[in-house]
Image (cartoon, coloured by chain):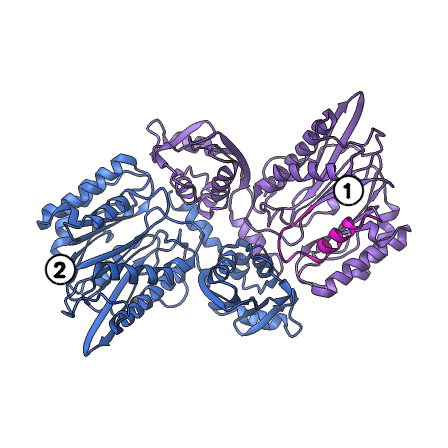
Chain colours: A blue, B purple
Amino acid sequence: MAVGAGKLPPLQPVPGVRLGTACAGIKKPGRKDLVLMELAPGSNCAGVFTRNAFCAAPVTVAREHLAACEHAPRYLLINTGNANAGTGEQGLRDARSCCDAVASATGVAAEAVLPFSTGVIGEPLPVAVIAEAIPAAAAALDSSGWAAAAEGILTTDTRPKGVSVSFEDAGRRYVVTGIAKGAGMIRPNMATMLAYLATDAAVETAVLQRILSDAADMSFNRITVDGDTSTNDACVLIATGAANNEPLSNPQSALYAALADAVQEVCVTLAQGLVRDGEGASKFVTIAVDGGRTEQECLDVGFTIAHSPLVKTALFASDPNWGRLLAAIGRAGLDELDVNQVSVFLNDVLIAEQGCRAATYTEEQGVAAMSPEEIVIRVALHRGDASASVWTTDFSYDYVRINAEYRT
Amino acid sequence: MAVGAGKLPPLQPVPGVRLGTACAGIKKPGRKDLVLMELAPGSNCAGVFTRNAFCAAPVTVAREHLAACEHAPRYLLINTGNANAGTGEQGLRDARSCCDAVASATGVAAEAVLPFSTGVIGEPLPVAVIAEAIPAAAAALDSSGWAAAAEGILTTDTRPKGVSVSFEDAGRRYVVTGIAKGAGMIRPNMATMLAYLATDAAVETAVLQRILSDAADMSFNRITVDGDTSTNDACVLIATGAANNEPLSNPQSALYAALADAVQEVCVTLAQGLVRDGEGASKFVTIAVDGGRTEQECLDVGFTIAHSPLVKTALFASDPNWGRLLAAIGRAGLDELDVNQVSVFLNDVLIAEQGCRAATYTEEQGVAAMSPEEIVIRVALHRGDASASVWTTDFSYDYVRINAEYRT
């Protein structure tokens, strides 16, 4: 199940990036499960990674290689079917072996390869199977390979996610294209999600990192399906410089603002795409909290609602159960919360105020507001000027089925 | 579904306490839904209540009445079927009206009555229906009424919970009897749970409060079914003094230690009973964390595992998915966690160490360890001397069904 049509839009090539996808047979034969991305020499690269203390071996190696300034990244290798997580020292050796295999197939240094894995935790990575398929992925490298790559990085996802945004600055046209995967284990601070964005703008690395970190904070860090944080999350932003602009170094410039907007738009679209394809999702829910003293307390309220199994099962049932919403707001840990000041809306319908059901509210209004696939829950705290939104899904039978059966 | 046989053991009367149960027809006709507890004059009373900012009207009124020293509690009135929560000013008036009704039926001051409600949130309390049934509950008052009361306070529970513990001190025999309800919305800091304990010991109020708070912290505050905290939780401990001992005032005394142990034993048994009857529960899971720097970090790890939907669905599937356990431990927020020091056991089977599957572990061992209804997940952090346990259940199709259908 998934929310909305979710057809992959046309993805614009990014000059300086080529992608190749292959069927290595890591978990199932015939499935696209290996993606190679090639970056033109001189490209810059920024990354954000999981904060889980048990981070997977490829995350450790990708971080190391990204920090090794003498070899700028030239290739990204992404496999699905096996996360190479919970695999100890052997896992680190395996991740490095995959980099070595790319290096020998392409003639770059192993440190110029960033490895990424997603799939089952705790199984040894089938390095030989992956290495054997690398030449096929390299042979398939093509600047129009984004759509195939969007397929090749999926696990329990039901559909690929990708988007392109283009913009103009000082007479030049730039593009940002991104793809992502992830359907479960999604929550703030990244989750079993992988996302790859590229632009043809020339951008200095520190500025690129700031643009990516800010965008991730407004997108991937504001979504949740089940509250779990994965060991493998990574999001990478590549700037190839093929547009031949003066390399962007000034955060006050118009190009910075335009690029940051475009990257954030791509990240938000991808993040919402992950939620719409959340495991077992039948609803896409925006929780918009305003009137908070700080943005953080708005996020606290938003995530407490978004993580509540009682709210999520009510959403699944299309039940306008405002009592469960009030209960979740009440346990979000806000100092001196005056519950009589709180108003709650379903779409445009005021359902609760002054600690109880709104006088004007009728159950029919609530049922009507709950019936679409896309719902906005708005919480007005009336104690400040801050606001924040998070995005989530309901909790369905299918969520239990998918996660009870995943390994078997 | 529920874990274990769960037959209600014989409940010993507590001299000084009588209980009467009636069928008021609050939600369904013919169902025991109203309980009146009568406390002998001179009884002392301690309580712990929900920390949810949206606390229900009866919680507010019970707190007020408990604090009003001039009228010691003489009656507790508990209704199911309607939580009188999210009901605003009208809810407060309704809770007070119920106290008035008990007062006029029994001849005590309204402030000597503590009201409790559990059930659906946001519907007006049917005061007239309750008031009409109070005489029947009063007529049924009996010192052997504990078992009927244990039935009369249930909502989505599948079975009553109660236990008696007796002990001797200085040649005198004392009893502690308790009953509780609650099956969902269970988590630390209380939850839609109500618990009533009584002892015939004479105990000063401040000491009684300390014994209850300590016991709740080691029991009701260490269980979770779904992470939600209710608006209505309450736990009350009554000391009637019918045993005619010198009133207990010294926390260093042998009687204090013996009574505190007995109260804690009753609370832990009731708390575990709530988890075993958790909504949709098919497993009873103890998460025992040791080797932590502080008790709090052990609790953080325990609750992060206990709240993980991915762990809970794996438990439902009897899947020894140690990868999800490691991922949960890794996101519990511990400072400087060295994942290579962490060991994880299922019952006595070492399943993971040094960040990966244990070399000695076989999938057959894991499957065997997961098959019983009662499972212990042990996490050894190896970085200190603190330890703590929490208790939880799995996440099943039935959990979704029960909570998607509860209002309809």
Question: Is residue B216 left or right of A199 when viewed as pictured?
Answer: right
Q: CB atoms at circles 2 and 1 under 8 Å apart?
A: no
Q: Could you tell me if residue B373 is visible in this image?
A: no
Compare residues B158 and B273 and report the one nearer the observer: B273
Q: Could you tell me if residue B197 is visible in this image?
A: yes
Please name the residue shown 77% across and 49% down the image. Answer: B66
Q: Is residue B98 above or below residue B198?
A: below
Residue bearing mark 2: A40
Is B52 magenta? The answer is: yes
Residues drawn in magenta: B48-70
Residue extending furthest bottom?
Answer: A171
Amino acid type of the residue that numbered disc 1 sits on in the rendered structure: Cys
Residue extending furthest right?
Answer: B107
Q: CA distance from mark 2 to mark 1?
A: 75 Å
Question: Is residue B405 left or right of A193 when viewed as pictured?
Answer: right
The x, y position of residue B202, in whole percent, is 81, 33
Amino acid type of the residue that numbered disc 2 sits on in the rendered structure: Ala
SS class, disc 2: loop
Chain letter of disc 2 in the image: A
Please name the residue shown 55% across and 38% down the image. Answer: B391
